[in-house]
């Protein structure tokens, strides 16, 4: 399997739906503009500066839930820095997908992710934005995480703490960024063949890293942190910041599709 990593600064669809992003094989669409509720039953939509208890995915039919008051992210109606789009604010918060459907979401050997996010100044090692794996040992599944206020790390498959590092991307910025991950099945097991990063006009090209080929497990998707070492709970590696959109596809997008989607997201979010 090969991995393609990119990070773009300065980038969802107009307030509501897809707004130009590809819809084919779209399984994950975390869009704060749609489906954020103050209750599990989804009877009371969020209003500005209210806690989110249920967030309906706009791809496969399931919701992310959080019933613990101190761990609910906060919904805000608009960010002037991002075309006045709604967003979720995470401050030691997290949500977990629910039901049987997400167990089989994004288990494909070919996937593409786009995350429009703005990290907080407290970014630390292994703080996790999104993951689907068995535990925190980075030896199966996939994970999008930070390594510090300056770097991101991404794991697909893995081989015990294996990771792809994206350096000098300044995960803490004045505006949202677009973080993308692509991987695909091939005769070569899990290799990051190329990736480039853009950060305020600065470009870094990565090197090749090998991984053990392991399938993504049938697990719930964790949003805002990672699983603990046993896999039965969540860890303290909480990702803090603002989330404007996360898209996940069960296909590896071509370079042209990747670039056009990034352009669309930049336009939507004023990046």
Image (tube, grey):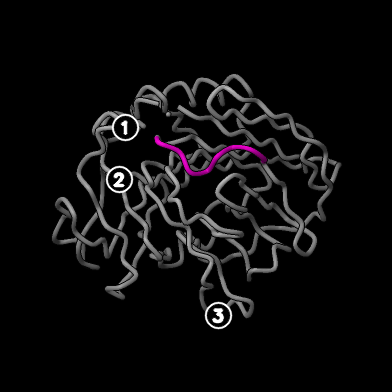
Does the magenta stretch mainly form a helix, a strand or a loop? Answer: loop
Query: Mark 2: which secondary structure?
Result: strand
> Residue tagged by mark 2?
87
Q: Around disc 3, counting alpha carbons within 10 Å, would you say few (fewer than 14), some (14 to 19), or many (20 or more)? A: few
Instruction: Say if 143 sits above or below 260 in the image.
Output: below
Residue 232's disc is 3
Rendered location of residue 68, percent (x, y): 31, 75
> Residue tagged by mark 1?
82
Query: In this rendering, which labeled residue sits more in front, label 1 or label 3?
Result: 1
Instruction: Say if 75 sits above or below 85 in the image.
Output: below
Instruction: Read off the magenta span.
Output: 167-174
Q: Quadrant of residue 265?
A: top left
Q: Are marks 1 and 2 in contact (CB under 8 Å)?
A: yes
**How far apart, in angstroms, are the residues tagged by discs 3 and 2?**
29 Å
**How far apart, in angstroms, are the residues tagged by discs 1 and 2?**
9 Å
Query: Mark 1: which secondary structure?
Result: helix
Instruction: Say if 250 sits above or below 157 in the image.
Output: above
């Amino acid at each position: 399997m090969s991995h393609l990593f990119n990070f773009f600064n300065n980038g969802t669809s107009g307030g509501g739906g897809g707004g130009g992003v590809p819809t084919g094989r779209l399984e994950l669409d975390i869009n704060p503009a749609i489906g954020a509720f103050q209750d599990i039953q989804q009877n009371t939509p969020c209003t500005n500066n209210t806690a989110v208890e249920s967030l309906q995915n706009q791809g496969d039919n399931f919701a992310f839930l959080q019933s613990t008051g101190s761990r609910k992210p906060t919904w805000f109606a608009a960010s002037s820095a991002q075309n006045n789009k709604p967003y979720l604010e995470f401050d030691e918060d997290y949500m977990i997908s629910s039901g049987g459907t997400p167990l089989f979401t994004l288990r494909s050997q070919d996937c593409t992710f786009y995350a429009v996010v703005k990290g907080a100044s407290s970014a630390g090692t292994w703080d996790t934005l999104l993951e689907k794996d068995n535990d925190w040992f980075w030896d199966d599944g996939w994970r999008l995480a930070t390594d510090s206020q300056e770097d991101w790390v991404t794991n697909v498959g893995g081989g015990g703490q294996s990771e792809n590092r994206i350096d000098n991307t300044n995960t803490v910025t004045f505006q949202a960024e677009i973080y993308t991950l692509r991987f695909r099945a091939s005769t070569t097991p899990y290799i990051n063949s190329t990736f480039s990063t853009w950060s305020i006009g600065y470009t870094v090209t990565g090197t090749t890293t090998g991984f053990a080929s392991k399938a993504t497990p049938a697990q719930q998707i964790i949003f805002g942190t990672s699983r603990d070492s046993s896999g039965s709970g969540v860890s303290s590696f909480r990702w803090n910041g603002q989330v404007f959109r996360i898209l996940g596809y069960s296909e590896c997008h071509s370079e042209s599709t990747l670039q056009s989607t990034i352009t669309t997201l930049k336009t939507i979010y004023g990046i």
